[in-house]
Image (cartoon, helix red, strand yellow):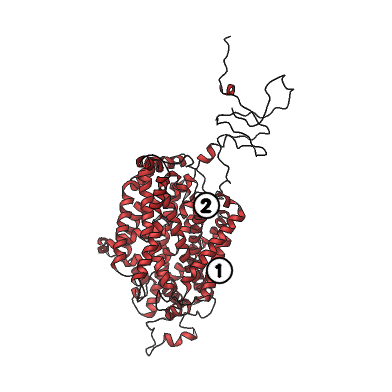
Amino acid sequence: MLHSGHHDAMGLPAPAAPTEPTVNIFQTQAPIAPQHGAEPPAPLGSPTPSPPRHTWAGKHTFLLSCLGYCVGLGNVWRFPYLCYRNGGGVFLIPYFLMLLLVGLPLFLMELSLGQYGAAGPIAVWKCCPILQGVGVGMLVVSSLVSIYYTVIIAWAFYYLGSSFQSPLPWSCDAPQNAELCQNTSGSATHASASEAFWNEQVLGVAHSSGLEDPGPVQWRLALCLLAAWVVVFLCMLGGIRSSGKVVYVTATFPYLILLILLVRGATLPGSLDGVRFYLASDWSKLMSAQVWSDAASQIFYSLGIGFGGLLSMASYNKLDNNVIRDTLLIAIGNCCTSFFAGFAIFSVLGHMALKKDVPVGSVADSGPGLAFVAYPEALSLLPGSPFWSILFFLMLFMLGVDTLFGNIEAITTAIVDEFPALHERRKKTTLLGVLCFSFFLLGLLLVTQGGIFWFTLVDTYSTGFGLIIITLLMCVGIDLCYGTERFCQDIVTMISRCPPCYGRTLCFFKACWVFFTPCLLLFTLIYTFLEMYGAPLHYGTYALPAWGTSLGVCMGVLSCVHIPLCAAAAVCSHTGTLRDRFHKATRPLRSWGAGTASAGTEDVVEVPFTITLTGSDFTAPQHSES
């Protein structure tokens, strides 16, 4: 008998009263003893109420947020370099094959997990508690990336401010560069003005001897770093509601700038030479394992797989959102952006090579060398160079901020899911402020005079083998523990109203999850280890010492060491034999799934009275024969 109050059923009938709502009870529980002064108990079968989860303002907001997260600096400064280094146009063959067999399946897996589970990178592993360490590893990777990625935004901020000068401070027209740009023959020297500005004025690396000698903080860069974190904090102050509005500008404006730069580059003398160099085909490169590994890693990193950002953003979708459509639109759009950006970059580099009378290959570079040395130098040769420089670095700033939104969203979502009390707006704002300020302090090491050496170390190892291990275990864990059939059924549940062709598409993804994707990830992981120990890490002519490499390996281990620890904790939390414990640790919890949380409460009606139920209320009445 359940006592929720007192309603006397004995005695004379009560006088007629206004009609009250009728309450049907379908579930029973053990009697609950009321406590003096206690709040009325929650409805039967309902969990402790938690704040409702926000959803995106619209489908376009989610698509733009994911596209802005995926389309980052690597699309501009890494893909074009990999393309010309690995056979030009031939590189597109392994690139799109890896997109088909690795990128799209993993992208769909992460979006589907987040949307169906309606939870962040840690809580989503209610589907398979033994893999909760995968979610913790995602947070570690996102944290490391957020620390050094904001430094890139600070560099772009510094150059953006410097672009409001005429002439540009890294151009040969600047008075301080007159001696540097001229020799007896009047041609450019080996150390260009742009390179000198980058190494001496921006980084101050000329005053550092290596990792062991970081030197003082470059205060101008530190202020730019602080400004970058302030922008991120303000844009994310309202969660997905505020960042979702910002991406309408930050995710679309870079495309306009790329188009403007492409049109301007196409009108320059020598631009076709740059494009030919970009797309020159060398079919023999297809026989090199390096090419296939570069294609896999570029797909892997440019889509943002394994960082938890995609999973967190998808957790704010409605359950019936079409994840397959979103996967195809975002992933293919991201890869096409990379290819498109190559034309904008190499058309301008071709013009610079013509002006300097050198081969295009001698001015092409990757990473910071392309974005902050080669391309700014090329822009300084154009009429109205400050205007083109402002556009370019504004684009870099927006690309970096968009990606950072996803990383910080992954971290905050995971923490708030684990500690629901932080859902309150003031507490969530405090959490965001603490995160941003902590990452700012940690990033100060990277803006010292020797910070570029530490940047190279963190950049290489934070997203190295550890991230591949995380993603490989995510894929294998879903296959073996949760079950591919069950996972596909979850996706069918979400897209049940879609055309039949999506079912056939899902069969292809299923084959990838079971065989192709894990095998290619394993190949990439093995090649990464071989490459890591094959040659020391360099920045320019400086080779990082052995202890630096060991520190980088520890950084990679830090991102995946939680996986076995959390798995052991999940197994030990159960009782029974080791086999029974393992079986229980791989079963989904009852609270798993987007519809589960509301399933128990969706039929509960609040009424202004309480009812006492007796055993007879659950006994079917006996009807007399007529």
The residue depicted at 42 percent of the width and 48 percent of the height is 569
Task: Report how far apart the C-alphas of labels 1 and 2 lie in the structure.
Answer: 29 Å
Location of residue 448 with respect to 502 vertically, above or below: below
Q: Residues within 10 Å of mark 2 (few under 14, many from 20)?
A: few
The residue depicted at 36 percent of the width and 56 percent of the height is 468
Location of residue 136 with respect to 590 vertically, above or below: below
The residue labelled by disc 1 is 227
Query: If the image is split into quadrants, where does the C terminus sit?
Result: top right
Q: Position of residue 260 (x, y in %)?
A: 48, 67
Name the secondary structure under disc 1: helix
Query: If the image is split into quadrants, where does the N terminus sit?
Result: top right
Looking at this view, name the residue that lies furthest to the top.
626
User: Who is closer to the viewer here, 221 or 61?
Assistant: 221
Q: Position of residue 172 (x, y in %)?
A: 45, 83
- Horizontally, residue 171 falls left or right of residue 479, namely right
Residue 104 seen in the figure: no
**Label for residue 156?**
none
The residue labelled by disc 2 is 60
Residue 157 seen in the figure: yes
Name the secondary structure under disc 2: helix
Amino acid at circle 1? Ala
Residue depth check, mark 1 versus mark 2: number of the one nearer the observer = 1
Amino acid at circle 2? His
Looking at this view, name the residue that lies furthest to the bottom.
184
Location of residue 358 by image quarter: bottom left
Location of residue 488 with respect to 460 vertically, above or below: above
Location of residue 585 by image quarter: top left
